[in-house]
Amino acid sequence: MTQTSTTTTAAPLAPHPDRLFPADPAARDIARTVYEAVADAPIISPHGHVDAALIADDVPFPDPATLLVTPDHYILRLLHANGVPLDQLGRVSTTPTDGREVWRHLASHWDDFLGTPVRYWFETELHDVFGLRSAPSAENADEQYDHLATLLRSPGFRPRALFDTFGIEVLATTDAPDADLAAHARLAADPTFSGRVLPTFRADAVFDPARSDWRHVVASTGEAAGIDTATHDGLLAALRARRQYFIEHGATATDTGVLDAGSTPLSAAERERIHRAALEGPSGVTAAEATAYRHDMLYRWAEMSVDDGLVMQLHPGVLRNHHQPTLDRFGPDTGHDLPAVGSFTEPLRPLLNDFGTAPGFHLVLFTVDETVFSREIGPLAGFYPAVYAGAPWWFIDTPAAIGRYRAAVTDSAGFTKTSGFIDDTRAYCSIPARHDMARRADAAYLASLVVTHQLTEEDAVRTAHRIVSDIPRATFKL
């Protein structure tokens, strides 16, 4: 389906067929064999942020920048770091976006992405999906923009056509507690659409009464469920009802991002007291009370997952919206969520003591602190039936980090207690490039085990198949 640009003014854009494979010739040959066995396997994406309405509505993408640059906070943050203001990248809702100008900024800063996974993904995406054969540059920016804009007006580049072209089998979205899931329902009922687009229940705001939107989300969750949330018991009942609504629309998982993994439960009387005080306003609870409430909610969340079977994804340790002026002007997801030190073993002990061996409970742990892979997540997954080691996520879903992750967790947990690759993206067209990257990185790691005689080549090929298919299906109950 790709088409070739006639651009000749910039460096060639030709991703090497052996990219990410080992330098050693023997290991490289094995990595090729392993990769080729799974290169065209269907994509299972159980954790992402593409809007289901994008696929349900199937309207043409408005312009290249709106599709490829503006929604991708990986790109925004590096452009911003290199001097491009966010208001010049389409992030001001009150000002119409000039897509051509946004693309010119990306093209003129192309070399600022050298060596980054963003550059890797983008090169693969532009070459394989859009047929560009020259790297973006200030000189060819307009020509490439016109080429891309022409493609986006053609039927083969509408969202559903790309879904098929990308080979996506399952795509999970991220959805608020009060979401009506109408787009998911339309897709499920549409006989012309054969893929699976599944909602994922994301209720972070109800966990933390110190958040400015806590009262609003608590109320809207109750309204969606038809249950009064003026009491904590009412909130829990509303959340259970909404989880069931999501299950009825195909959900298999929840997703939770909190500051830390504390999970100490409170007594019913104490959590009710804090809940009622928080409803009076943010000043109604102390910081310690808000933290205790959040920890109890994480415990209750696991309790609900044991009851209804939804997979519980947990990614603590992120300082959200680090730069207040950027948040005030441009809103969240604009590139300034930053990693914090992670910890799981002690914080999760109350939760795992009660639910870590519960039949059917799946808890997938993600981190942005690589030091906990070998120290905490791998060993936890290597003992508790409920715990799975989530793939490198967000800042560390990079080729090098995937290799470090495998080396860190495989000794303790093997391959079957991992999650499969997580693309975690809003950038729809980067999905195949990111999954291809993971398949290459895993092929390189498996090849390293073969050449050191820890696996046979047949074992490596079979494991690669399991990583892209059987393991995510089992972990996320697909």
Image (cartoon, grey):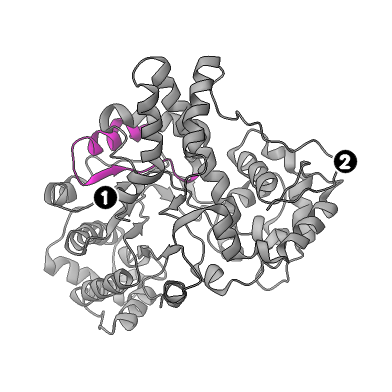
Tell me if label 2 and label 1 are in contact, CB under 8 Å. Answer: no
Q: Compute the Cα span from label 2 to label 1.
A: 50 Å
Q: Amino acid at mark 2?
A: Thr
Based on the displayed image, in which of its 4 quarters is residue 330 positioned? Answer: bottom right
Name the disc covering residue 363, or none.
1
Q: Secondary structure at mark 1?
A: strand
**Where does residue 187 sit, x and y in percent of width and height?**
46, 72
| 65 within the magenta span | no
269 or 41: nearer the viewer: 41
Name the side, left or right, on which 332 lies relative to 383: right
Q: Position of residue 86 (x, y in %)?
A: 67, 57
SS at mark 2? Answer: loop
| Residue 115 pos. (x, y %) | 64, 33
The image quadrant where one finds the C terminus is bottom left
User: Can residue 69 be seen here?
Assistant: no
Residue 229 in percent (x, y) is at 26, 79
Q: Residue at horizontal 46%, vertical 30%?
A: 34
Q: Which residues are magenta?
A: 370-394
| Displayed quadrant of residue 453 | top left
Q: Is residue 257 above or below residue 448?
A: below
The amino acid type found where label 1 is placed reads Leu
**In-front residue for pair 210/223:** 223
Q: Which disc number belongs to residue 9?
A: 2
At horizontal 65% and vertical 60% (from top left) the residue drawn is 67
Q: Residues within 10 Å of mark 2 (few under 14, many from 20)?
A: few
Q: Nearer the viewer, residue 462 or 244?
A: 462
Residue 123 seen in the figure: yes
Look at 46% across and 54% down and name the residue there.
320
